[in-house]
Image (cartoon, rainbow, N blue to C red):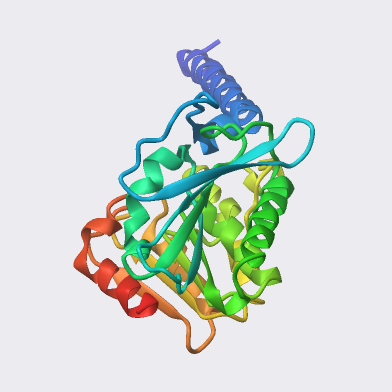
Amino acid sequence: MSALEVNTNKSRRKFFRWLKLGLLVYGIIGIALYYLQESILFHPEPIKKDSVYQFGNKHDEINIPYNNETTLNIVRFKTDDSIPKGVVLYLHGNRKNIGWYAKYASNFTKNGYEVWMMDYPGFGKSTGKFTEKDLYSYALQFYKLARATYKPNEIIIYGKSIGTGIASQLAAIRDCKYLILETPYYSMTSLAAHYFPIYPVGRMLHYDFPTNEYLKTVTAPVIILQGTDDGVVPYRNSKKLKAVLKPNDEFITIEGGTHNNLNDYPIFHHILDSLLK
């Protein structure tokens, strides 16, 4: 066997060793993505049921038994107005619990709106488990609770981050005054494809949250707030939602805004104040 043939065989064996290793790593990561996706997507922080929230805002707290294993904890932040203008149903992101998002309640209460925040099961004091379908059902119960007090034109549905898909689905099946989305994604599948382009994420994900599909049937005005430097939901992913907005809907770009700091920008408050006043 010539030296050239020996070198060729060595190169071939080396190539196949690396190929096998690459396929092994690809498979391991794929399996982890499939079985651990809940841990990747959701980062809840549970707290004891008897814990007392120390919020500066006036508020009360209710627990809604949904079924034998699921209880939904809701905090209702009050306005100083004797007669509120309405209520904001705030569907929060994938982190921690209501205690993390409570600081945003004053954006609405100062303008005469109550703010109701619901923790998903496993977050805060809420218990149980969930699927994507369950999250939609919980949001619908949340809306029905508000309808006992408020008319549809007094209800604003607000979604932040992962909550934008849930909020969009709710607004697609129930009337409201506005649907406001902060840092929304086109769909969870499209967002996952951005991070894992070599995987068939459409067949792997347990959560799709097709915001783009839901917005097509939302009749209420839609307002989207998105930062150009969002490191979680890339601006170009969110911007694709422009294609499904109605002529009077708004897509508002906040230059330099990231995923968690839009509240620091005056334009963010100007938009909210304009809508709520």
Q: Position of residue 91 (x, y in %)?
A: 52, 54
| Left or right relative to 101: residue 152 | right
Whether residue 222 is visible here, answered yes or no, is yes
| Badge count | 0
- Residue 126 spot, x, y in % from top left: 60, 35
- Residue at 59 percent across and 74 percent down: it is 176
Q: Is residue 113 above or below residue 119?
A: below
Residue at the limit of the structure toward the right, as seen here: 68
**Image position of 118 with respect to 83: above or below:** above
- Measured from the top left, where is residue 123 in percent x and y? 54, 34
Position of residue 27 measured from the top left corner of the image (x, y, whole percent): 62, 26
Could you say which quadrant of the image residue 122 lies in?
A: top right
Closest to the observer: 186 or 204?
186
Residue 36 quadrant? top right
At 43% from the left edge and 49% from the top edge, which residue is drawn?
A: 59
Q: Residue furthest front?
A: 82
**Residue 173 vs residue 248: left or right?**
right
Q: Is residue 198 visible?
A: no
When asked about the image quadrant of residue 145, the answer is: bottom right
Q: 118 or 137: nearer the eye?
A: 118
Q: Quadrant of the C terminus?
A: bottom left
Q: Residue, x 61% and y 75% (percent of image)?
A: 151
> At 58% across and 43% down in the image, what residue appears?
62
